[in-house]
Image (spheres, grey):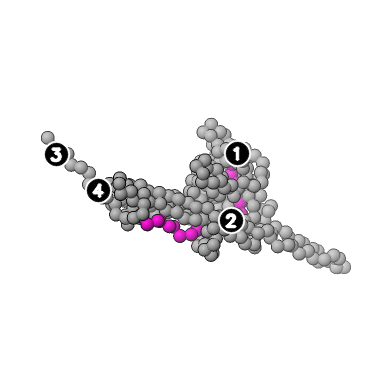
Amino acid sequence: MAALIPPGLIPAPTPPQRPPGLFDVALGPMPMPFPEAEGGGVQYVPDACEDDIFLYSITCPPVSGSKTFSGIEAAVSGAPFAVITSYTCGSIGWTFAEVEQRVRLRMQLREQRAVERRVWQGWNLSNGQGTQAGLFANATNVGDTGCATEAIAKLEQALADNAVVGGIIHARPYMAPHLGNGHLLEPNGRGWKTHNGTPIVFGQGYDGSAPGGSPPTSGSAAEAMYATGRVLLWGGDTVVPPLQQTLNRDTNQQYALAERVFVAALECGAWYTNVTRNCTTAP
């Protein structure tokens, strides 16, 4: 009878890349502009959101009247929020350095998903950790659409009508095959863009809900897609409290926590459509 040989413990294989998503098209995450931003957020006046344009005729005799001057653009602000990842291990025997490396890796792989959730739907947590509305909460409805092609058309036209520079289209990953089936996607680095060049984010943290609505169910035929101005992100340092202080010496259980503060802001507004999903391929 062959002896039972226990499996040998080896180092974990090289982790995968962070999934494509918001970090690939947003401006940032940039370093915090000053330490106080982690507590109070940021505010700035953008340069790209004024949509006024004026024309006048050069004729003889000359036209009368005066030239018009546009006002200053509305300030953009972003509130801080924290992303947390954790790691717990028992008596397997990791060193403090190994545990810290693992919890930091979890943060690197998961933080984008958390930021995407904050940007789209925000959260209302029942565990006492607060409420924060998503940045799309006040999006303008451009009307329902019957297919993915019409959804892209309406959203890009909304960006054009509002003279948005640097616009982005957002959808949950469920919509990627539908847009691909309609030949609406072109490669764009690690992600995708429309034929018009607008980047599309299929965020793992997005839930497909319209403002004030619920996420689509498996039997739902429609879900929301959004067009926005630029998304700007700032991120602080990832902090891991000293692991010697989070070791339960009675049970030999190690608890590790990684925390990173972000600030997210949205320029120029947001627009959405509830699109009916279908599998019709464009000719």
Q: Which residue type carries mark 1?
A: Gly
Q: Which residue is at 54% across, 46% downward? A: 130
Sequence-wise, the earlier of marks 2 and 1 is: 2
Q: Which residue is at 66% across, 53% downward? A: 160
Residue matched to label 2: 78
Q: Which mark is residue 9?
A: 4
Disc 2 to disc 1, how far (Cα)?
23 Å
Graded by Cα atoms within 10 Å as few (under 14), some (14 to 19) or many (20 or more), the crowding at tag 1 reads few
Foreground disc of the pair 2, 4: 2
Q: Which residue type carries mark 2?
A: Gly
Disc 4 to disc 3, how far (Cα)?
18 Å
Sequence-wise, the earlier of marks 1 and 4 is: 4
Disc 1 to disc 4, how far (Cα)?
47 Å
Q: Are marks 2 and 4 in contact (CB under 8 Å)?
A: no
Residue matched to label 1: 213
Sequence-wise, the earlier of marks 2 and 3 is: 3
Residue 229: where, in percent of width, then height? 61, 54
Disc 1 to disc 3, how far (Cα)?
60 Å
Q: Is 129 colored magenta in this rendering?
A: no
